[in-house]
Each structure stands twice: as structure tokens, then as C-alpha cells.
Image: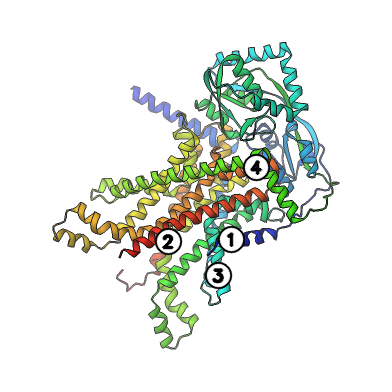
Amino acid sequence: MTAAVAIYGQLLSIRESIVSNLLTEDRWKMMVEGLGVTLEISLLSLLLATLIGALVCSLRMSRSKVVSHTARIYIELMRSLPLLLLLLVMFYLVFASSGLGKVHIAVLCFSLYFGAYISEIFRSGIEGVDQGQWEAGAALGMGKGLVLRKIVLPQMLLRILPVYKNQMTALIKATSIVGYVSVMDLTKASDVIRSRTFDAFFPLLLTAIVYLLLSWLFGLAVNALEKRLTPKSSTR
Amino acid sequence: MSGYRIILLLSLLLSACTGRQAVPDAMPTCLEELAGHTVAVAGGSSTDLLLSQYEGIDLMRINIGDMPVAVKSGRAEFAMMQEIQYDANQLDAQGFRKCFNGILKGLSAVAFRKDDVGICDEFNSFLREMRASGEYDRWYGNWIHQLDSMVVETEKLPAPTEGRKITVGITLVFPYIFIRNDSLSGMEIDLFNRFCRSKGYCPEYSIVQFPALIPSLNANKIDVILSHIMVTPERARQVLFSDEYMEGSQCCFGLNPEWEKSARAGIWTRTRESTRQNLVEEDRWKLLSGGLAVTLELSLLSLLLAIVLGVLLCYLRMRPKAAASGVTRIFVDVVRGIPVLVILMIMFYVIFAKVHLSGVTVAVFSFGLFYGACFSEVFRTGMLSVDRGQWEAGAAMGLSKMQVFRLIAFPQALKRIVPVFKGDVVSLIKNTSIVGYVAVLDLTSAGDIIRTRTLDAFFPLILVSIIYIILSRLSGGLLDTLDRKLNATK
């Protein structure tokens, strides 16, 4: 009986948490909008970072010393700066007086930062394909672009997908720091709710669960892609 | 590749940005005229609550110290802060102007826990004595009119070091509470030190983010809130306010349309001036070196904890027992699926909310946990990459499992682990920069404090960036050496 009362009390307090943290003043809207911003920043950055990664990778592998060196400096720079600091530099210095919105600056920042990592992933993927494959392609009379497209890329894609997935999940999670420059993303929304309701547990737990779901769903999507890319006859 | 090239590129990149700013056509004269504009407010403050009720105002929730930078850079058109905080000498000279004031007139007080009636009475009686003896008027008048001399005077009278211990939650807000010459100073610090001296308390000041003050108080992390906190009915339901000791109101400010920039000095003079202002004045370099020490401490301790935890988790994960490995797998996946920042906040505000631990300790636990989960996967892939045949061959030669691990499997795995491990270590060091979120004074937040006091974004940010670049390269280089040594002993 006492146990039943205790459980009932717990349920009541959970209900109260939900009411005060989500329903009062339509606070759930804040969370949903925050999630929207997180998704927007993540998706845009994901696309742009992949593009930047491909571009930087091609520059890095260029035969011209100057070009490949510049790309290397860029990669090293991004890899040695904390993301938060890069965000602050972008926000308060580089794009301080430009007309770009906060979200766009954040997208640029994440794309530049993760683009450097992605470019290295691409490079290691291409270098991981045996030199003999290139030579065999050339012997068959194929051009360099054709070998890259038909032979090297399919092999490389399969190889880099797991690492790529990790890096992109890291990107989705890293977007949580944008609250520092007052972008209302999921984390910041829960922070604002927390500062109003003085209840830390519920909003933070909810945020953690949403991020978990996001990472998990993204992982599922990449896994599905991986399955499609794996050749049917392969015995892997 | 040399570090100086990176720094060169960085400065080139930054010199590309010019100081254009959007100056508003007309200054608003009341709250209603703020509609359609972006206004910076302190998150969770009473201004935040007030302005949220107005339609059409785009609110930007930031720290008070960031407001001038935000307005100057055009991120926000106007900002609201306490009238007394608007340091006209400094801000007017930089092209700001007050638009209107007198908003949200209110009284500020010190806040205690609801059940701490005794100490609240002591504070109230101290205030009454102070008012009766005329000490209050001297304190108030001197701080308002002769700020600089009062600051020096406060430094000569440090906080008492003996007596009943009391933990005071503060936020850095000029001129009430700020850091000068590497020590706390300000109007309210002075007041509270006087109280402690007269009633026999030994204050221990702990910096807390403003929105976290009341939760920290109710979670017993701090005993008093001293942050120029306004008495509002909502807050009075949560805490016990002392008698009010100061009246204040909010003002709104923006860029002055009539202000004309003085001619720019040469680059050399400017650099020298920046160095003086950002590092030498008020011994600000001590903030930076202290922050660097915290960053190093945090990184090293977290790294150690993460390695220990990583080994443990990797061991559990590779157990043949399905239960042990399954539970570990779920644990690792959950931890890795949540942003470090959210883990840090959960640790700080939920798990360790009731325990009195320093921010650094909580941060070490958070980073240790997150990177421990990451490391465990790195270690596991390393171990899995060793061919099964190696284990079988070892067993065939009569070696025990432990011996095979130590002599055969581990050395091979290590070679594969180190390159990946290096990336994670560097990422750990860089990621410690987010601890400013829970008010730990690390390198990044030290740079932030300097930035918000000197209103110069360029110098502190670039300096801190350079320090991080050096740190990352040093740690990366160290692990590269290890990698080379391992590969040399083939």
C-alpha cells in the first residue's frame, strides 16, 4: 500500500514536472523550435562540410606544392582550435559586421571546422585504395576522372562510411554549443526553461534523450546507405 | 609545418574583416519603440521576463559583459543593463549612448535559503546598524562617485579568513562584483566583506552563472546569493530575501548616431595599446595564466580518468558474458550519443547538484566519462584488429592468456591505437573550452572576461586561439613521438 502511494506520488510529481516545464506558457514550443534550429544547423552544416571536405581534399592532393600546402595549413589550423573559440572568433570578429544571421554564421563555422576533418577522411579513403587499381584502370585505357568515378570512389565510400558517420554524429552533438552566442537551439531552449522553472532534471533529461534519438536515427540512415553501397555479390 | 604560418594565416583572415557598423537612424525613447529591433538582455533576468511580454522584440539572451560587443558588432541593435552598470566614461568614449532609463525600477537584496532565517536576521541587523551609523551612506556615496579609490580601499581590506564558513554565489557584474588584480573587488563584495567582519563569518566566493544561482542555492551548493539580484514575487517564492540595500533600474543603450570615430592610430601603437589594456592593466595576464592552469589541470585529470575508465569499459565490453558486454555496450552508446555539453550540465545541475564539489571536479568527471566511453571503443577496435591466430599461437606455445595479452596482443594493438588516440586527446583538450558554461574560469572564459571588460574582441580571442594552437600541437607532437618510437621497435 505504501509502495503504491509512493509510486502515485512519483507519478504526480512527474506530471507536475511536465506541466511546469512543457505546458505552462507553451514552453514545449520553445523546445520544438530549438529542435528545429538544431536540425537546421546540423543538416546545413552536414551538407556544406561534406562539400568543403571534398574541395579541401582535392586541393590537399593537388600536385602543386603551394596549393596542397595551403590546404594543409587550413586543416591543421582547424584541427588545433577549439570549436567554441572558432565560433566566438567567427561571431565577434570575422562576421561581426556582416549582415549574416546568427544561424548562418554557426553553419559556416561548423562546416569550416568539420570540413577539415572530413577532407582528411576522404584523403585517407582515397589513399587506402590500392595504387594498382589506378594502374589497372589506366592500362584499360580509362582517364583519371573515369577511374576515380568508376573504380576508386565506390571502394573508398564503403571504407570511409563508418568514420564519416562518427564525425557527422560529432557534428550534430557539437551544435549544442551555439547557445554560447545566444542561438536558441535545443540545449539553449532547455537552459532557458531551466532558468524559469528552477527545475534542472526534466529539461536536461529530455534534451539528452532527444540528442540520443538524433544520433541513433542518423546512424540508422548511414547504415542503410552502407547496405545499399555494398555490392550484392560481395561476401563481406 | 611550423606554427607561425598558421598564425600568419589567422591574422590575414582576420585583417580581412573591417569595422563597419550599422548605426540606427533614431534612438528609441521607450520600451514600445523597441518593437522590430533586436535587443540584448541578460538571460533569465527580470528584463528578460519583462521584454518577453512585448510583441515584436527580438530578444538576444547573453551575458551582460557581452552586450557592448554585441551592439558594436551589430548583432543586437540595443541592449538593456542596470543604469549603474552603464560605465559612461568607458562606453560613451567608444560610441555608445543611453537611449532611455528608469525601466523596471526595483530594489536589490541578498538572497538566502527559505529556512536560513537566522543568518538573514543577522544580515538585516547589520544593514540597520550600517544605516544608523552613517556607514551605509559613506559606502554608497563613495562607490558611486569615487569608484577607483574604493576599489583600492577594498583591496586593502581583504575578506576575513576566520569564522563560520559561508559560501557565496556570485556572478561577475561590473561594478558590483568584478575581478581586478586577480582578486575579487566591487561594491557588493565590499558590503558583504563588511558584514562578514562584523558578524564573524568567513566568506568563500564561488562564481555561478546567473540563471543557475537560485537552483544552486536551493541545492545547498551555495548559502547566499550576492549578485545584485532584484526582489521579484516569483523569486521571493523560491528564496528568502534580506532587506533591500540598493535601488536600481534598467537603462537601454545603443550606438550613438552622432558619434564620430577618431582617426585610427598606427598598427604598432594600436598593438601596444591593446597589449597594455588587455594584459598589463589590472594584472589581467594573471587571469589568463590562471585560466591556462585550469585548462591544463582539467585536461590532464580528465585524460587520466578517461584512460582508466576506457580500459575498464573495454574490458567489460569484451567479456564473453552477454550481460556484462551488453550493458556496457548500451552505456557506451548512450554516453557517446549525448553532447558533452549536455553531459556537463546534467552532472552539474542534476547528479552533483546536492553535493558540494568544485566546478573543476564536476567537469573532470564529465569529460572523463565521455572520453572514457570514446577511448573504450578505440581500445576495443585496437584489440580486435589483432588476429585471432596470434592468441591461438600464443596458447599453443603454452603461454597463459595474460601473458599472450601482455607480450603479444597488446604491443600490436597499441601501434594501431595510438594514431586514433592522438586525435581524441587533442579533441579532449580543445573540448575543455566549454566549461565556461558552468562558470569554471578556464582559458576561454578568462579570455571572455577580459574581452567583456576591455570591450576589445580581437586581442583576447586571438591570443587565446594562439595558446590553444600551441597546446594542441604540443600534445599532438608528444603522441607522434610515442607513435614513432613504437613503430621503430618493430
Q: Which residue bears the numbered disc 2?
A: A163
Mark-to-mark CA distance, 4 and 3: 35 Å
How far across and down, in percent of the image, does residue B251 sit? 76, 34
Q: Are the residues under marks 4 and 3 on the same chain? A: no
Q: Residue furthest right?
A: B258
Which chain is indicated by disc 2? Answer: A
**Disc number at residue A69?**
3
Please tell me whether mark 4 or mark 1 is closer to you in this view: 1
Task: Please name the amino acid that badge 2 sits on.
Answer: Val
- In the rendered view, would you say B222 is above or below B89? above
Foreground pick, B26 / A40: B26
State if disc 4 and disc 2 touch (CB < 8 Å). Answer: no
Mark-to-mark CA distance, 2 and 1: 31 Å
Q: Residues within 10 Å of mark 4 (few under 14, many from 20)?
A: many
Q: Are the residues under marks 1 and 3 on the same chain? A: no
How far across and down, in percent of the image, does residue A136 sit? 39, 84
**Disc number at residue B450?**
4
Mark-to-mark CA distance, 2 and 3: 24 Å
Q: Are the residues under marks 4 and 1 on the same chain? A: yes
Residue B148 visible to an observer of this rendering: yes
Task: Please name the amino acid that badge 4 sits on.
Answer: Ile
Quadrant for the C terminus of chain B in the image: bottom left
- In the rendered view, would you say B418 is above or below B355? below
Foreground pick, B68 / A156: B68
Please tell me whether mark 2 or mark 4 is closer to you in this view: 4
Residue A82 visible to an observer of this rendering: no
Task: Please name the amino acid that badge 3 sits on.
Answer: His
Q: Earlier in the sequence, mark 4 or mark 1?
A: 1
Which chain is indicated by disc 3? Answer: A
State if disc 3 and disc 1 touch (CB < 8 Å). Answer: no
Q: Residue at x 20, y 54 (%)?
A: B403
Q: Which residue bears the numbered disc 1?
A: B4
